[in-house]
Image: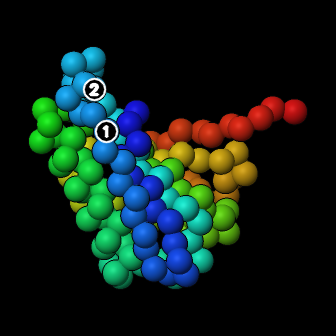
Amino acid sequence: MVLAAEVTWNGTLMRVTRVSPDYELIRRGAVEVGIALRIGSFGGAFSESDKTALSLAALAGELVRAAEAKGLIVRELQVDFDCATARLDGYRLWVLAIRHATGSVPVTITALPTWLNGAAFRALAETAGRYILQVHSLA
């Protein structure tokens, strides 16, 4: 998994920090890779087709195409979004837009244990198609 970009917010203004992976070096070690997009906490409204969703989707598509242009096979785009459990329905809208932009490349989301029991998570997971459970510690 290669971190390709991180999104942070100034209010609802999106700020993108792109990472410049050495795709040539990566290609020598592994032809197939996963590309990671990290998204920080967001306090605005969610939509599938507003400026924010379209910008995130365009970024996701660009990240995938950049890796493919370097000769890599992108096996997944992993989205790691700091989303509040109460806002998972909105996050699902972003995932719809991102999936559309990545074409045949599967989208995987990272999920927190606190998300698992809600109906909103089920819909989000079904929309993404895949998820990775993020466990930071065990008691």
Instruction: Name the residue located 77 percent from the left edge and 35 percent from the top edge.
Output: 137
103 on left or right of 80: left
Q: Which residue is mark 2?
A: 26
Vertical side of 70 occupied by 27: above or below? above
Nearer to me, 94 or 72: 72
Task: Report helix, strand or loop for mark 1.
Answer: loop
Could you say where residue 55 lies in the image, as x and y percent from the top left?
32, 71
Tags 1 and 2 touching, CB below 8 Å: yes
Inspect the image, locate mark 1, and give the three-letter code of the amino acid beneath it.
Pro
Query: What numbered label is drawn on residue 42?
Result: none
Give whichever of discs 1 and 2 has the lower sequence position.
1
Could you say where residue 123 lies in the image, as x and y percent from the top left?
51, 59
Where, quadrant-wise, is the C terminus in this rendering?
top right
Residue 70 image-quadrant placement: top left
83 on left or right of 30: right
Where, quadrant-wise, is the N terminus in this rendering?
top left
Q: In this orientation, does residue 12 appear?
A: yes
Instruction: Name the residue located 12 percent from the left edge and 42 percent from the top edge.
Output: 69
How packed mark 1 is, by other alpha carbons closer than 10 Å (few <14, some 14-19, many 20 or more), is few
Could you say where residue 35 lies in the image, as x and y percent from the top left?
35, 41
Residue 122 image-quadrant placement: bottom right
Nearer to me, 119 or 42: 42
Query: What numbered label is drawn on residue 21?
Result: 1
Could you say where residue 85 lies in the image, as x and y percent from the top left?
67, 62
Inspect the image, locate mark 2, and give the three-letter code of the amino acid beneath it.
Ile
66 on left or right of 111: left
Q: Residue furthest top?
A: 29
Callout count: 2
Nearer to me, 131 or 35: 35
Vertical side of 6 occupied by 108: above or below? above
Vertical side of 88 occupied by 27: above or below? above
